[in-house]
Every structure is written in structure tokens, then in C-alpha cells.
């Protein structure tokens, strides 16, 4: 069976999220071989970016760091080699005979011209869709700095959509007063889907020195701690938009995927959970299939089920 996510055919509706093992063609191919229905590349921009100084990612655990992991803080700073150098990574995935799954190119820029230049620059590698990163919370002048302004989101979405002949997804930030307003702007610009959510702004301080732990001082929170935020955002967007919503944020088991679908997600992306289990895609999808079988649910019935429980 083929599952459609906003015009992109998937062998199953689990997708590797941007920024997690999407740095090389080899790592993306491995995730597909491990069960991902599709992969999103790391975010690629118009020029090479080194990123923020280390520490750029830390694990957050309960009980003073001794208990269960509840999330991750990262401030990578969108490091990337630029689209000129990254085409070979997409080409590698596309060339693998035993790897057949969509590759969605995540792209960013500082303005409309940047986004269009990157999209057009990657088209020769034939990505199956573009995901517009207007939501990264820790890269000055990029990401959420743009994605918190509806007019810019609409303008950038429309420009990329007009420049390419493939689906365009827009990844939204939760760090706004009204995510529905941003989703409507993406829809007005011609987006084929929105992706919700990117990381939540956060910070950690070393109590022994008083110094912020991250090299960038603050960063983005991901992992189980953000799942309730993501579920609420997906729920609100599904209630508001006419285009599909792809859910991402804190999914680490099949129950999480079912919950996200009931909120309104037609597919999900998995990121942080890959660090603990690189077979997470196969495990999650098998659990969802078993749940549907045991309860007599069709796949489409799960999508938005919570909205029909009124």
C-alpha cells in the first residue's frame, strides 16, 4: 500500500525529520533501509555555514541528570555545506538501487531570493518535495525570525512554489502567539502541507559555574517533553487548514504516532528518538498497524479522530 503525504507517495507514513541523520546520503539511505517511509535532509542554505560553537547539543534527564531522558537541547546554528556541495548527498540516496523512498529537501534562507536560489539549485538532484525551514529557533536572521511573520511566510512559500514543479511543505515554529495564523499564511502561499512543529526555545544553566551550557547560550528543545505542544499545534492546524498537516515533535513509540494522527496528522516525522533506536520507524509503524488491526480502524479513520469526539 502507498500512503500519500501531500502529494508525496510513502511506503509507510513515518519520515526522518530534518537535522537528524540527514547530513549525508549514506545516513539517509540507512534510515530508509531501517524502515523510514521517507527522509528529510538537514536544512540546506545558500552559502556554507559553520554553525554555533560547542556544546551544541545536550541531553536533558530527570533527577538532576540521573533519571529518564525527557528531551534534548540543541543550538547547531544550521551548519551546512550549501546547496552546491549537498547535491551529491541527494544524488547518492537516489542512486541506491535497494533504497526506494522519497527524499524531501529541507531548505532555508534569509529572504525570498535565497529560498528560490537554493530550491532551484537542488532541483537537478530531483528531490521529491521541499520543506521550507522557517522555524529554526537559534539561527539569527533565518528560521523563526522569518517564520513568525505571516506575510514573509506567504511570500516565500509562493515564490518557491512558483519556481519548482514539486510539492512544497512549510515547517512551522511553535514559538509564536498564534500558529494557526502562520499556517494560514503558508496555505495562502500555495503550500501543499505544513509540518508542525520545530523545536521550542529553551535554555540550560550549569548551577556550579553559572554559565549557560550551550555554546549559543540558548537553543531548541526537542524530545518527549515537547510532544504535548506538538499535539496541540497539530490539532489547531487541522481544525483551521484545508491542506494536510504532518506531525513532528516528541514521537518515540507507536502510541505517540497514534495520538498525533488523532490530533490530525496524516503522516509523522521522527527525529530525536532515532538517537536511542535507529529502527524506530519500523517499530513505530508495526505498532500502529497492530493497533489498527486490533481495533478495526482504517488508516484514514485515525486522522483527526479527536475532532470527531465532540
Image (tube, rainbow, N blue to C red):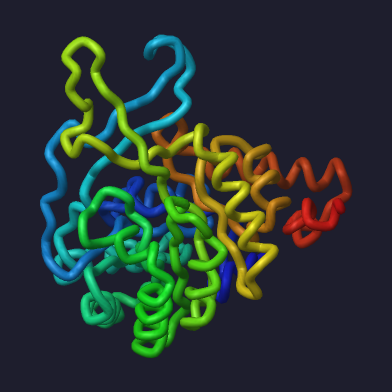
Eyeballing the image, is 155 above or below 83?
below
Residue drawn at the location 27% of the way across and 48% of the way down: 138
Q: Residue at x 30, y 80 (%)?
A: 123
Image coordinates of residue 194 in percent, x first then y, are 52, 66
Q: Is residue 175 visible?
A: yes
Q: Residue 193 lies in what quarter of the image?
A: bottom right
Name the residue: 35% across, 78% down.
156
Pick the residue in front: 252 or 198. 198
Q: How many numbered marks appear?
A: 0
The reply, left or right, for residue 124 in relation to residue 291 is: left
Judging depth in this view, the residue of 100 and 236 nearest the camera is 236
In the image, taking residue 77 as reference, residue 9 lies left or right, namely: right
Residue 179 location, x and y as percent?
52, 60
Q: Is residue 36 above or below residue 85?
A: above
Which residue in the rendered view is the most extreme toward the bottom? Answer: 162
* 263 horizontally vs 137: left or right: right
Split into 4 quadrants, where in the image is the N terminus?
bottom right
**Image location (x, y in percent) of residue 61:** 42, 19
Q: Position of residue 142 (x, y in %)?
A: 25, 62
**289 sits to left or right of 265:** right
Amino acid at each position: 500500500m502507498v500512503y500519500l503525504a501531500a502529494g508525496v507517495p510513502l511506503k509507510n507514513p513515518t519520515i526522518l525529520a530534518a537535522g537528524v541523520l540527514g547530513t549525508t546520503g549514506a545516513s539517509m539511505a540507512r534510515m530508509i533501509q531501517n524502515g523510514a517511509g521517507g527522509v528529510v535532509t538537514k536544512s540546506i542554505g545558500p552559502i556554507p555555514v559553520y554553525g554555533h560553537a560547542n556544546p551544541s547539543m545536550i541531553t536533558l534527564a530527570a533527577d538532576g541528570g540521573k533519571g529518564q531522558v525527557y528531551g534534548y537541547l540543541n543550538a547547531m546554528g544550521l551548519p551546512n555545506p550549501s546547496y552546491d556541495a549537498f547535491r551529491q548527498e541527494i544524488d547518492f540516496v537516489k542512486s541506491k538501487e535497494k533504497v526506494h523512498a522519497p527524499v524531501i529537501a529541507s531548505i532555508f534562507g534569509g529572504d525570498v531570493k535565497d529560498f528560490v536560489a537554493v530550491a532551484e539549485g537542488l532541483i537537478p538532484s530531483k528531490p521529491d518535495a521541499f520543506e521550507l525551514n522557517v522555524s529554526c529557533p537559534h539561527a539569527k536572521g533565518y528560521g523563526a525570525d522569518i517564520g513568525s511573520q505571516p506575510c514573509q511566510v506567504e511570500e516565500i512559500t509562493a515564490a518557491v512554489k512558483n519556481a519548482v514543479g514539486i510539492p512544497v511543505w512549510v515547517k512551522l515554529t511553535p514559538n509564536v502567539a498564534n500558529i494557526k495564523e502562520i499556517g494560514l499564511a503558508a496555505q495562502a502561499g500555495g503550500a501543499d502541507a505544513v509540518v508542525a512543529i520545530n523545536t521550542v526555545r529553551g535554555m540550560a544553566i550549569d548551577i556550579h559555574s553559572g554559565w549557560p551550557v550551550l555554546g549559543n547560550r540558548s537553543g531548541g528543545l526537542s524530545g518527549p517533553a515537547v510532544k504535548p505542544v506538538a499535539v496541540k499545534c497539530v490539532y489547531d492546524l487541522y481544525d483551521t487548514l484545508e491542506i494536510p498537516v504532518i506531525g513532528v515533535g516528541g514521537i518515540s513509540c507507536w502510541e505517540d504516532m497514534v495520538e498525533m494522527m488523532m490530533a490530525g496528522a496524516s503522516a509523522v516525522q521522527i527525529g530525536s528518538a532515532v538517537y536511542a533506536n535507529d529502527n524506530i520507524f519500523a517499530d513505530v509503524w508495526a505498532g500502529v498497524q497492530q493497533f489498527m488491526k486490533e481495533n478495526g480502524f482504517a488508516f484514514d479513520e485515525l486522522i483527526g479522530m479527536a475532532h470527531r469526539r465532540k
